[in-house]
Image (tube, rainbow, N blue to C red):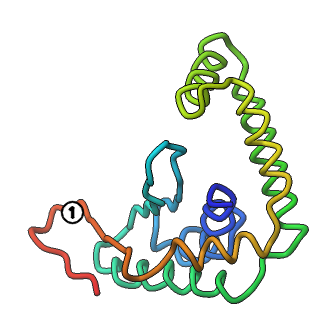
Amino acid sequence: ALDLLCDVLCAERSDLYKKLVTEEQRLRSLEAGYNLARDKNLIQFDATLVKSDDLQYAKDEITKAIEKLKSNLVEEKTLSEIKSRTKYSFAMRMNNPSAIANAISNFTWLTGDPESINRYYSLIDRVTPADISNAAKKFLIPTGLTVSTISPEAEVSVK
């Protein structure tokens, strides 16, 4: 659910991406990701701003999108398209021995079983809009938020 949640919020087709990157052009890029790991991991949102003055605005818009996702279910059609893209983009990357070995080794490292790749993508199929909303409610909470910046300015203030 967390992998899909990241795409729902920040993929190029998302409302947030369209607003901040395409329409307003305040961001050069917007991405979110969750790395599979044995231990708890971070859900990371990466935004590359055009102007550093828009940092607070970008953070506020990302936060609004997260809060909206907690109370409004993603459309089933949208989720189905994201699931399909997730599965098929993974399959399309398996186009050489090195990519295949890396994918198998990552899942084997996590679980000890290379078949876990199939189980993982089977679970992707079963994620519902309610699962996405519940994951946002559980994991995307203000008390767990850390904002870090890389900027030429000595200090950048974000509330």
Quick one: 154 or 74, which is closer to the camera? 74
Quick one: 36 or 155, which is closer to the camera? 36
Q: Position of residue 34 (x, y in %)?
A: 53, 53
Number of marks in picture: 1
Quick one: 99 or 41, which is closer to the camera? 41
Side of 157 where 19 appears, left or right: right
Residue at the (69%, 77%) spot, across then down: 133
- Amino acid at pointer 1: Ser
Quick one: 13 or 5, which is closer to the camera? 5
Residue furthest out toward the front? 112
Among the 4 quarters of the image, the one containing residue 149: bottom left
Give the secondary structure at mark 1.
loop
Quarter of the picture containing the C terminus is: bottom left
Q: Is residue 32 above or below residue 114?
A: below
Residue at the (16%, 61%) spot, across then down: 152
Residue at the (66%, 25%) spot, across then down: 113
Side of 145 where 44 appears, left or right: right
Q: Is residue 56 above or below residue 93?
A: below
Side of 84 where 6 appears, left or right: left
Q: Is residue 88 above or below residue 134?
A: above
Quarter of the picture containing the N terminus is: bottom right
Q: Position of residue 99 (x, y in %)?
A: 62, 20
Residue furthest out toward the left? 154
Q: Is residue 140 above or below residue 151?
A: below
Among the 4 quarters of the image, the one containing residue 66: bottom right
Q: Position of residue 115 (x, y in %)?
A: 74, 27
What is the crowding at mark 1: few (fewer than 14 residues within 10 Å), some, or many (at least 20)?
Answer: few
Q: Position of residue 93 (x, y in %)?
A: 69, 28
Residue at the (48%, 60%) spot, across then down: 43
Among the 4 quarters of the image, the one containing residue 88: top right
Give the residue number, with chain letter if any, for mark 1: 151
Residue furthest out toward the right? 77
